Image (cartoon, coloured by chain):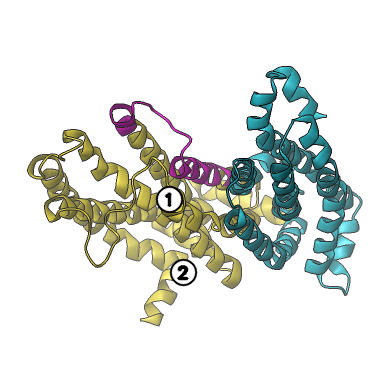
Chain colours: A cyan, B yellow
Amino acid sequence: MVVSLYPLGISPEPEILRTIAPGVVWIAALLAALFSLENLFKADFLDGTLEQLALSPHPLPLLAASKVLAHWLISGLPMIVLAPLLALLLTMSPAATAALVMTLALGTPLLSLIGAVGTALTVGLKRGGVLLTLLILPLYIPVLIFATNAVSAAAAGMPISGQLYFLGSLLALAITLAPIAIAAAIRISLS
Amino acid sequence: MWAFFHKLASPKHFYRITGSWIPWLWAVTLLFMIPGLYLGLWVAPPDYQQGDSFRIMYVHVPAAWMSLFIYVFMAVTGGIGLIWNMKMADIMAASSAPVGASFTFLALVTGAIWGKPMWGTWWVWDARLTSELILLFLYLGYIALHSAIDDPRTAARAAAILAIVGSVNIPIIHYSVEWWNTLHQGPTVTRLDKPAIHPSMLWPLLLMAGAFQVYFFTVLLMRARSELLWRERRARWVRELFGNSAGTTVSNTQSNSDKAVT
């Protein structure tokens, strides 16, 4: 949806589209993650489910990780599936399309994991939405930079393994540590 | 040694001990800053490429170092407060955030002023500039989150988690100049074997860095002391300190109503 606005808003010229395409798709993915994040814990917080989760005998980081996985399935995965189609619409080259799908596969789980930390911190606040954006966007920027950099490099025919390794290492770090941070943040928000 | 640190962790002793440090810290700050500024602005020779405009470096570089250092300091003290439930660590972390944000802003502004004659533009979307801007947003997010939560304990713990998560960005900012070949010049000082900068320029820079460092601790202690008084305003030692005067009855009723609430 957002992606289709760019050609209308900026210019339908294929040359311009090709240069801005990585950024357009990635910003769309970022916004998709951001808009759906606010509801990640909200309903559970309001009806008390979150407290029950925190009290349950299962480790809270594991439960938090499953919530994040669910979020990624509805916000990140559709983006990966749609990416080749969007790339076609934005006249990207096959190499760039492959790079786009790879960076999205590595990057969107990262967006969900980082975002969930911010959501868990702000879930108890009345107007957490604005604050959430301020907290999360700075943490998203490195992901965005590495990912779009990789796609642009692939479009120019350069190797992209460096950027992919970096995204992969960030993802490994986030998968192992973010659930712990999310669980700690949930406990703080509930106290 | 440990007994001394334990004493510092108690608000009452912290207030008493650090009160006597502050004049000395100011003196040390000036001791570093005056020769640093003198050597930097008058004695150091003009740069063979950049002329006199390189002298803004003596504010810009230490401010940029401090912006990173304070963030790490904030994350570490936040972590200490989170793990060991130390009130003083929370106060330290919360008090350092605005100072860090100011240093980050100072680094960005001096960089822009320097960039206008050198690069011909105020701002470039270059790796180091962008990551320094991200750092500013991280500081602002920390401050906003801290002030959005009413209970100081909860606020400190939530903000500490944010600071620790955000500290992933610190190495990215630090190495951004080496990882991406960008417009911002590479580091010239931190090469241990042979700095790529002449001693006559290096010494004022180190002096200024020392001055900024001591200045940070001075301002930090002053902020922490006033924050401490505010949080402990109903404690007995604060009331004794201020002669048990006017506010006593008010604070008594306040603490009673607080008890009723809890």
- Residue count near mark 1 (Cα–Cα under 10 Å), binned few <14, some 14–19, many ≥20: few
Taking depth in this image into account, of B230 and B81 the one nearest to the observer is B81
Instruction: Residue B10: give its label.
Output: 2
- Report the amino acid beneath label 2: Ser
Taking depth in this image into account, of A133 and B233 the one nearest to the observer is A133
Is the magenta region chiefly helix, strand or loop?
A: helix
Is residue B243 visible in the rendered image? The answer is no
Give residue B82's position: percent from left, percent from top. 60, 66
Residue at left 69%, top 20%? A13
Q: Can residue B140 be found in the magenta stretch?
A: yes
- Chain bearing tag 2 is B
Kind of element beneath mark 2: loop
The vertical placement of B160 against A128, above or below, is: below
Taking depth in this image into account, of B179 and B250 the one nearest to the observer is B179
Taking depth in this image into account, of B140 and A69 the one nearest to the observer is A69
Instruction: Residue A129: give its label.
Output: none
- Report the amino acid beneath label 1: Ser
- Residue extent of the magenta highlight: B113-141
Give residue A133's position: percent from left, percent from top. 67, 40
- Chain bearing tag 1 is B
Q: Report the residue that reaches farthest toward the left.
A: B43
In screen coordinates, is B114 left or right of A50?
Answer: left
Pointer 1 residue: B226
Kind of element beneath mark 1: helix
- Residue count near mark 2 (Cα–Cα under 10 Å), binned few <14, some 14–19, many ≥20: few
